Amino acid sequence: MNPRNPMPPAASDLQSTWAFLEEGVDHIMTKLHTGVSYSKASNTIHYMSLYTVAYNYCTSAKMRALDPMGITSRTGASLMGSDLYNNLVRYFVLHLKTLRENAEGLQDEALLRYYAREWDRYTTGANYINRLFTYLNRHWVKRERDEGRRQAYPVYTVRKHSGPPLNLTHLAQLALLQWNTNLFTPIQQNNARLTNAVLRMIERERNGDSIDQGLVKKVVHSFVSLGLDDTDLNSECLNVYGESFEHPFLDATVAYYRRESRAYLDTHNIPDYLKKAEEWLKEEEDRVERCLVTLSRRALIPKCEEILVLEHQTALWEHFPVLLEFDKDEDLRRMYALLARLPDGLEPLRRNFERFVKAAGLAAVAGLVSGTEVEVDAEVDPKVYVDTLVSVYNKNRERVQRCFRGEVGFMASLDRANQDYVNCNAVTSDSSTKSPELLAKYADLVLRKNNKIAVVDDVESALQNVATLVNYTSEKDVFETFYQNRLARRLVHGVSASEDSESCMISKLDTVCGAAYTTGLRKMLAEMKLSKDITDRFKERTRWGGDGATKVDFSVMVLATNLWSLKPPTHDFIVPREILPLYTGFRQYYQNQAHEARRLTWLWNYSKCELRTNYLDQNYLLMVSAFQMGVLVLFNERDTLALEEIGAATGVERGHLEQVLAILVRARVLVNEEEGQYDLNPNFRSRKIRINLNLPVKAEQKAETRRVMGSLNDDRKLLIQATIVRVMKARKTMKHQSLIQEVVTLLSQRFVPQVPAVKQVRASLLLLCGQVLTIAGDWGVVGERVHPAGG
């Protein structure tokens, strides 16, 4: 369209200037869709002409007048700027009055669509107008605000915005202020029409209806844009958004979900409610992203969690054991995710989970004994026992990872429950040493040669299971003692599966119990290598005709007494003449190798031999103990020997000798037809060529546990003494109760010490060291000091 008013000259008055500008401003605000030209040849509004007229008027200084809008009268360019500014304000007021009148009869979605359409048109036009009055913003408005007159606003300015992007690149301060005053506030004063219309649309969506989410988002974001901070125009201000939308929206949300959640629980079970609550929360998260302002999430989601979870947490807690019992993993995952949103929502679940795991472990072990009472020393299959414990542990550990995201609190509950049922169950009864003993036996089975466990199962996995269960035993030193004893037997008898497997087990124990726990075990493996080197050098010497040269294959293990839990025999043993040269030759060789200060103690009870029969049609290879070998070689001279003669020739005490002979008689190598007389069986027959006669003696089997526990008690007393001395050396002075507590805490990593035992050791230690106690009131031990020499 052609402008009705021609472009005024540079020195025109306010009336002619504003007449030309008003026509252009109105076109931009109401008919922008018809276009704005930047070329003078166009028939539409010429944008550059408008800019030039505004600039010329602001820079003229030839009139003087009063400011009708309340801006103080001044002369020159300041007066020109205020006149132009006030006319622009009057235009916005009249324009918005027309828009307000058109909106009076609209409700709900129709009102929102009208509001959003006019908002787009208004803010877009304000963007163009801002550029028209660039000189006014840059000089007059800036000077006014610098001088403290806050009622002057730039037509357009840049402002920070933390929410999602709006349709506007800039926020029009003056234009938005007028929109708020002359359109938004009057509509809201009529029963909050805009806010209620938005809330009704959101409730429709919550009830399953489809709505125009873009429309809601545009209206809500306009509330954010209307906020104004007079002190900093560039900062975001949410006063309008908070008062006009966020607070009513949160109240409506609370009321809606309180009503809906109660109604849903009345007609559905807990698993269904978990799914629904998860769905509701997800919908609200999505709604914030699609329709609302991102910053509303901080207030909205906690409100939803309070209504949907906190108000019903007791019902969720009570149903948790049922979900565990029936392995409802998906429901457990949902319950964890919901209650994890609350500060203390998970603690009751952790306690229930701990009770459940403990009960499951006890029930599983009780199933092994089939309802019968088990004595403490009853024989239980170590593999079945360990497999049962590991099954319960793995199932619940996987559940923690899968359903509870490996949360630290649930892992701690699992650890406490495992410790309870591993140490005290139907198999262990009241004995705290039974579980460590069975674990050591199981490890021994895994690490032995030709064992079905090592073939069928993965060895490393089985060893990891042992290490995991050892970590839960309260008497770790019991396991260490039994394991060390059986390791010694495997190494001495040469039945260990491999050195790699032994090292793997020690490494796993190192990870669980610490390096100090496995130092002795590593030294045992190292000593086996040193012993082999000594034996190889001795064999090399004897092969070339050195001292003790013989055709008998002879191997010796030289082991340190302080590392190996091997006890020498309690009776004498006369070395048979067949191996006497080797026996004497090795002793001389060892002492000649710079070991004069060391004394060799021969452990005949751990020795083994292989004998070949030459008196039968079939040659057999008999695997026997040293004592059995001593008996059998006697029959090279005579076919019949009396018990007294065998005892005198071997030096073995009568009780033990009878058990050795009984094994040979049961194998029918010897015949005992007359009491006290033994004959070599000339009719011996066997399907096997290699016959193992080296069977454990009953007396040795029964004594193992007593011997291990006896040495363990002595070791514990020494450890308590060392811990007390170490603590007092560091602290110098301590109260009695504090000393006891610290010692118990330090020792609990290896075993659970009894307080009376600690007190007894402390008292004996004080008497032994000649220390005196300084007593002060009821505080117990206040200080300990040593008498000086000669004092």
Image (tube, grey):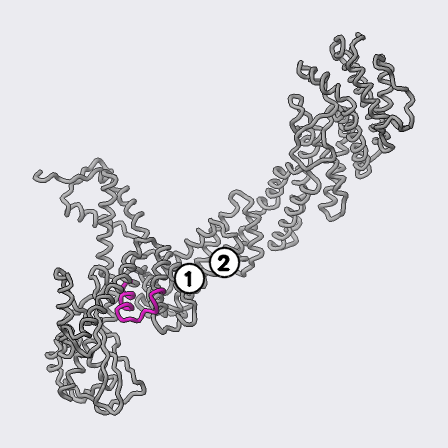
Q: Marks 2 and 1: in contact by CB < 8 Å?
A: no
Q: Which corner quadrant holds the C terminus?
A: top left
Q: Main secondary structure of the magenta part?
A: helix
Residue displayed at 27% across by 52% down = 754
Q: Which corner quadrant holds the N terminus?
A: top right
x, y percent for residue 328 = 56, 59
x, y percent for residue 734 = 25, 39
Q: Is any atom of residue 20 visible in this view?
A: yes
Measure the C-alpha gap from mark 1 to mark 2.
19 Å
Residue displayed at 17% across by 78% down = 550
Return the residue nearer the eye: 159 or 149. Answer: 159
Which structural element holds mark 2?
helix
Q: State which tag comes first along the sequence, 1 or 2.
A: 1
x, y percent for residue 444 = 33, 67
Quick one: label 1, few (<14), some, or many (20+) residues within 10 Å? Answer: many
Return the residue nearer the eye: 312 or 404. Answer: 404
Q: Quadrant of residue 56?
A: top right
Provide the residue span drawn in magenta: 484-501
Residue type at tag 1: Leu
Q: Is any atom of residue 751 visible in this view?
A: no
Quick one: label 2, few (<14), some, or many (20+) residues within 10 Å? Answer: few
Residue 666 among those drawn in magenta: no
- Find disc 1 in the rendering and name its residue: 362
Q: Residue furthest left?
A: 790
Q: Judge left or right: residue 71 versus residue 538.
A: right
